[in-house]
Amino acid sequence: MMAQAQISDHAAIGDGRSVALVSKDGSVDWLCWPRFDSPSVFAALLDGERGGAWRVAPAGAFGTTRRYLDGTNVLETTFHTATGTAVLTDAMTYGGGVTLRPAHELLRRVACTGGSLLVDARFEPRPDYGRVAGRVRAGGVLGAKVEGLRGELTLRSGVDHVASSDGALTARFCLRAGEHADFSLCWDDEAPAVLLPLGDAARARLDATVSAWRAWAGAMRYRGEFEGQVRRSALVMKLLSCAPSGALLAAPTTSLPERVGGDLNWDYRYCWLRDAAFATRAYFALGYLEEGRAFCEWLLNATRLTLPQVRVVYDEYGQPLPRERALWHLSGYWGSRPVRVGNAASEQLQLDTYGEVIDALFQLLMGAGRIDRTMQKLLRELGHFVAEHWREPDRGIWEVRGAPKHYTHSRVLCWTALDRLVRLSEAGLLERLPVQRLAAERDAIREEVEARGFDEALFSYTQAYGEQTVDASLLLLPWYGYAAPDSPRMAGTWRRLRERLEPEPGLIYRNEESFPAGEGAFGICAFWAAEFLARGGGSRDEARALFQHALESANELGLFAEECAPGSRSALGNYPQAYTHVGLINAACALSEARA
Amino acid sequence: MNGLSWLVWGFAGSVVLTVVMAAGQGLGLTRMSIPYLLGTWVSADRDRARVVGIFLHLMNGWLFSLVYVAAFHVWGGSAWWKGALIGLVHASFVLSVALPALPGLHPRMASETEGPTPVRLLEPPGFLALHYGVQTPVAVMVGHLAFGIILGTFYRPLG
């Protein structure tokens, strides 16, 4: 039985179509192939006994240090033992001078850099979330194959494995200084499968992968005080961007809990439209125009079939999500059950999504000079929908599963949607828009928000109309241009937020319901706060201090989860979380632009 | 020989065979893609190989249908069951002789004994092409039966 590691003990590697999580002790604890949202091959992260894992690590006691190779998503784990030192390099490869490639390859090379040591390898695939005991069949020089899958999973290695009684393949071998062993796990959807060679050819694939990542990371435009953290965040965004479609996934995992032992466990292997504007701005700010445009193209493609309504969340190819269901056979991360796949939030009405989508397209289109007819039609339809429906209650940014409410943030995003459309029309880019009507609705929203979304006694904007609670999403009001960051009302709101939602410097809860629910602080909220301060809500020094405190929630590799437990700063929720990293990038850019 | 009838029904049979095999992939019966298998003969580019392979497979089908047509003439005419019987023999030959011998011919296919090298990377099919899924023989058999039945039913000799 494998023990479960902590969330932040993991590093992420990937190839733009899938992601694996590798623990500090050299275990691949999470991998879904062939897609991000496919059933898992390894899921020890969610069940140490049934999930399956692939571990390569020294036999006996060892210590570990690890890093990403500079400017890459290639992981290097160094094992220190009493007799020697070994470096394990993990990467999902691409390129390498061989054009015939399998659909995916996870390449692992363990090399002894000093002394000698015994290494244990244990390959225990448990496909389909542990429901299939993968029958591993030895195949001689062509490698071992896992049978019973739709695709073909092949493990090739330079060391001999033996089948153990529990269905795993194991190997123990000795490495001396200068020696290494390669392990190549490939997935192919169709036959004949491509089997990749080891040795020098494997080295070449690894080198090509490193070069490709460095070339991409080297194109980043940000040159500021936090360049290292921003580059890592950009690399996480790229890792979670679906290369074939341009979609940006929220996270590569499902059901890592917002409360350990609880049931706040959701599947995040999908793309939320809500975060479109943040992600687009981050891409453009860093100079990754191609990724920004690809993401907007994906937005258009995904929303086309459901217009004028848009769903909250789509899969990586813009399809509706599968029905949410619980996998009760898995014990969950440290007993956090149920493990869920699919996401019921896709059926909710969340009006803020319209504002996010329109704002993302606005950022793209204002620089484009013209808008084609299809895009104009889409924007008009979205505008009409918002104008018709903005008075309705919804589930809000946090996808509350209770009764719908009149959330202030949602209303402001409706205002944003109409404001951007009016501005596009005024710029002569959008034709046949009922500008006067939309402008009147926009002004009516502002009037209503100022009257019902602001509490005079509290002197703060409130989470929802008529309530006296605050919500971190209110920090975004200046971000959308709705309110000036240094306005008295925003200053009052920030004061209340700090009083009620800041348990310690650098951590912000999303709202006041987080306390009774036992949730952690939301990673992105701290970066929203830093950006709010940097853009005029406070001084640059205040913003910088908050930003630096927020950085402390990352693990030593610079990866953030969705949430973080106050005090221990242990990671909670799905991991790594794209939008926490997007928040970091936007806040760092705001800090660079802010005057000292 | 009725050239037009051969051209039309040989082509139709090849299309149906390709569709049946693709359906077998979609239904999870087999991973084998004959267009991909043939296309990688001439190209190491995966996407190009697939396109070229479709063309090669259709050409192959046309060529093989000549053998079927010849057999009908020798056998005193066509009938669906004659086509099915020839299809059965054809599929058995492909599975037990042609595919296992492929590593000796295919320029990019690895051998069971030598393993992949940087230029020979494709997994060999093995006996009855079982490496491509345990139900591959079923899919190949169904595809060739359909091919034979179409030719046997619709091909009409002149006169």
Image (spheres, coloured by chain):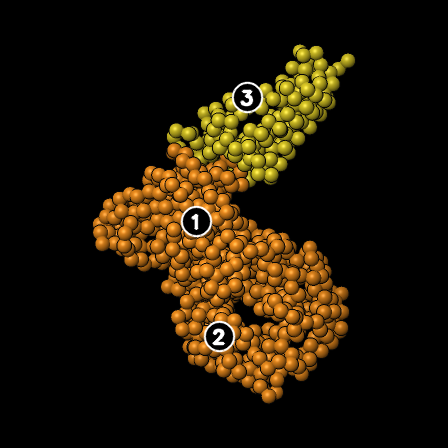
Tell me which label, 1 or 2, sits earlier in the chain.
1
Considering the image in quadrants, where does the C terminus of chain A appear? bottom left
- Residue sitting nearer the eye, A77 or A430: A77
Chain ID, mark 3:
B
Task: Please identify which colour was used for chain A in the image.
Answer: orange
Please tell me whether residue B156 is drawn above or below residue A86 in the rendered image: above
Viewer-nearest of discs 3 and 1? 1
Inter-mark Cα distance, 3 to 1 = 40 Å
A88 over B61 or under it: above or below: below
Give the colour of chain B. Answer: yellow
Residue under pointer 1: A52
Q: Residue at x 46, y 46 (%)?
A: A126
Q: Where does label 3 land, which residue?
A: B93
Q: Is residue A484 left or right of residue A574?
A: right
Q: CA distance from mark 3 to mark 2?
A: 69 Å
Rendered position, B10 above or below A438: above
Gap between marks 1 and 2 measured at Cα: 35 Å
Q: Is residue A517 visible?
A: yes
> In this rendering, does residue A33 appear at all?
no
Q: Which residue is drawn at the image coordinates 30% and 43% (left, top)?
A: A172
Would residue A335 be found to the left or right of residue A417 on screen? Answer: left
- Residue hosting label 2: A508
Q: Position of residue A356 (x, y in %)?
A: 61, 67
**Amino acid found under the numbered disc labelled 1:** Gly
| Residues at discs 1 and 2 in contact (Cβ within 8 Å) | no
Which three-letter amino acid code belongs to the residue tagged 3? Phe
Q: Check disc 1: other Cα within 10 Å, few if <14, some if 14-19, many if 20+.
A: many
The part of the image, by quadrant, that contains residue A402 is: bottom right
